[in-house]
Image: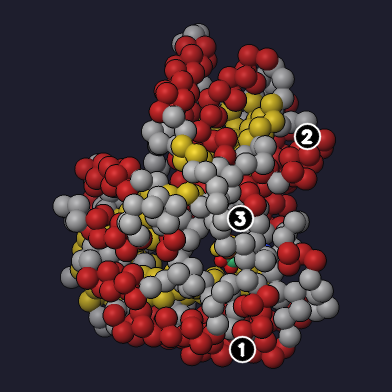
């Protein structure tokens, strides 16, 4: 598929920054400190986008709140991957009527994947008059300009045109934590899995230049971040559009070469593009976490084909085995869709048997959700919701059993973990993550947050480990 990789000119971003200054002068003219709320749904890419929205809002002089009744600007960053998330968004956007009634000057913006779908933008236009601004993921770089338009014209603004997307560098970012950071290395997806709406709303794959990724990674390390997650819908196709000969494994090695004590993670990998070179690089790079999130989606070749996943059960099994050969301590996690149109009892049984065979450390399971405009939406689907729920429950039970068994194997072992926050509970007041990303609760001084410590695992359940500092 040929298309032109569009880069937003640096002057354009500088213009947005100037607009931030103009908004700042306006909203702080009376000496007040305006507040904004950014509500995020969906994946890590959306979390990363919200950090850019907050970066812009901070440059406009806004502080932040979680309470919509205090907010002068509310931004809802939405997800379109499943219907459930969309329903939640619409419910919560509708409820903003109350805060807007109490504060009529409140500006409500809805952005992200959900509104990049034409029918959803229309629905908001017609049925949600509380919303002042709608913009899709491709317009995020010009959020200041769009917000200023709403402020100046006192009119609703809609900006979610169909478009293949661009790469914008230099947008200010305001990260929440001080320990973990998201770092987008590419945007969009070219895979068109038949159930998935992402390629339609996030445009074609486009990679950031390696220098831009490395500069941001170096800055994160300088600021003291200890856990950096490289993000993309399919990181394994990183660099293909750049033509410079740098692939994802090369990029991983370049990030690994940055001096400092930190961990590198990444997600998500598509099994059709995961290579032996990637596994070898992961094994050789001492900062790279031995964690691979490799969504299998189904264990049936018929279903995988209908999903347009471009690999077979056999190929997936071979990849999992190869990755474990390079990293015997690998933590392998996956996504699975239950109830894809026409999935039979036998085909579901193949998914169960694949999961038994691979023994995933964690499985993220979803019931198929029909997405407007995707090929799967028009496939015959004779199975009932109750069938799908029964399969989902069976898979959840298996997943819990395997995770429980895997977690028990950690008991008595001593591991290096990164302390990343407080749990708010006693006696295990701190939370931490192993190199493979497993959650460990422990007791200790909150001053340890941001440090790597050794922990002896003393207990476990299906979703967490418990340990003591050694
Ligand atoms: N229905 C259910 N799950 C979906 N996913 C993507 N699209 C759908 C859909 N239409 C799941 C896939 C993907 C994860 C992020 O969300 O498992 O890997
Ligand atoms: Fe969706 Fe498939 Fe792209 Fe993942 S790889 S975002 S599941 S189309």
Mark 1–mark 2 contact, CB under 8 Å? no
Camera sees residue 61: no
Q: Position of residue 147 (x, y in %)?
A: 59, 24
Q: How far is disc 1 from disc 2 in space, using C-alphas?
A: 44 Å
Question: Mark 3, residues whose alpha carbon is within 10 Å: few (<14), some, or many (≥20)?
Answer: many
Q: Position of residue 166 (x, y in %)?
A: 51, 40
- Ranked by sequence position, the earlier of labels 1 and 3 is 3
- Residue located beneath label 1 in the image: 350
- Residue located beneath label 3 in the image: 198
> Could you tell me which secondary element the residue under label 1 belongs to?
helix
Left or right side of 47 for 327: left
| The residue carrying mark 1 has its beta carbon less than 8 Å from ligand 1 | no
| The residue carrying mark 3 has its beta carbon less than 8 Å from ligand 2 | yes
Q: Position of residue 15 (x, y in %)?
A: 46, 20
- Residue located beneath label 2 in the image: 125
Say if 402 sits above or below 51 in the image.
below
Q: Nearer the viewer, mark 1 or mark 3?
A: 3
> Could you tell me which secondary element the residue under label 2 belongs to?
helix
Q: Nearer the viewer, mark 3 or mark 2?
A: 3
Residue at x 69%, y 26% (from the top left corner): 157
- Ranked by sequence position, the earlier of labels 1 and 2 is 2
Residue at x 62%, y 41% (from the top left corner): 163
């Amino acid at each position: 598929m040929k298309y032109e990789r569009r880069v937003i000119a640096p002057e354009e971003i500088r213009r947005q920054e100037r607009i931030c200054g103009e908004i700042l002068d306006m909203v702080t003219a009376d000496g007040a400190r305006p507040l904004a709320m950014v509500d995020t749904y969906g994946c890590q890419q959306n979390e990363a986008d919200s950090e850019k929205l907050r970066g812009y809002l901070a440059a406009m002089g806004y502080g932040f709140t979680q309470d919509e009744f205090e907010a002068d600007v509310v931004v809802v960053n939405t997800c379109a991957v499943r219907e459930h998330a969309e329903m939640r968004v619409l419910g919560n956007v509708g409820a903003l009527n109350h805060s807007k009634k109490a504060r009529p000057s409140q500006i409500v913006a809805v952005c992200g994947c959900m509104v990049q779908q034409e029918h959803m933008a229309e629905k908001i236009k017609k049925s949600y008059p509380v919303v002042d601004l709608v913009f899709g993921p491709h317009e995020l770089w010009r959020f200041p300009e769009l917000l200023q338009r709403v402020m100046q014209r006192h009119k609703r603004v809609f900006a979610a045109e169909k478009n293949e997307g661009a790469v914008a560098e230099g947008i200010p970012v305001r990260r929440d934590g001080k320990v973990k950071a998201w770092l987008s290395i590419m945007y969009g997806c070219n895979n068109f899995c038949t159930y998935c709406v992402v390629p339609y709303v996030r445009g074609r794959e486009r990679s950031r230049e390696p220098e831009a990724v490395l500069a941001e990674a170096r800055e994160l390390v300088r600021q003291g971040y200890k856990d950096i997650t490289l993000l993309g819908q399919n990181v394994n196709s990183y660099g293909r559009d750049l033509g410079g000969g740098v692939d994802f494994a090369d990029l991983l090695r370049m990030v690994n070469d940055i001096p400092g004590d930190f961990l590198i993670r990444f997600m998500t990998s598509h099994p059709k593009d995961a290579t032996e070179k990637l596994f070898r690089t992961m094994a050789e790079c001492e900062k790279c976490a031995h964690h691979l999130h490799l969504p299998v989606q189904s264990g049936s070749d018929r279903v995988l084909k209908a999903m347009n996943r471009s690999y077979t059960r056999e190929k997936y099994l071979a990849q999992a085995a190869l990755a474990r050969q390079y990293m015997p301590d690998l933590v392998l996690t996956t996504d699975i869709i239950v109830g894809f149109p026409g999935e039979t009892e036998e085909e579901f049984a193949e998914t169960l048997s694949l999961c038994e065979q691979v023994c995933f450390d964690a499985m993220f399971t979803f019931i198929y959700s029909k997405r407007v405009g995707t090929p799967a939406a028009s496939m015959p689907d004779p199975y009932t919701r109750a069938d799908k729920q029964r399969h989902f429950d069976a898979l959840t039970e298996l997943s819990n059993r395997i995770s429980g068994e895997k977690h028990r194997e950690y008991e008595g072992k001593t591991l290096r973990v990164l302390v990343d926050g407080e749990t708010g509970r006693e006696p295990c007041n701190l939370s931490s993550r192993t190199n493979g990303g497993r959650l460990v609760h422990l007791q200790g001084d909150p001053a340890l947050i941001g440090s790597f410590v050794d922990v002896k695992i003393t207990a476990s359940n299906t979703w967490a480990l418990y340990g003591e500092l050694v």
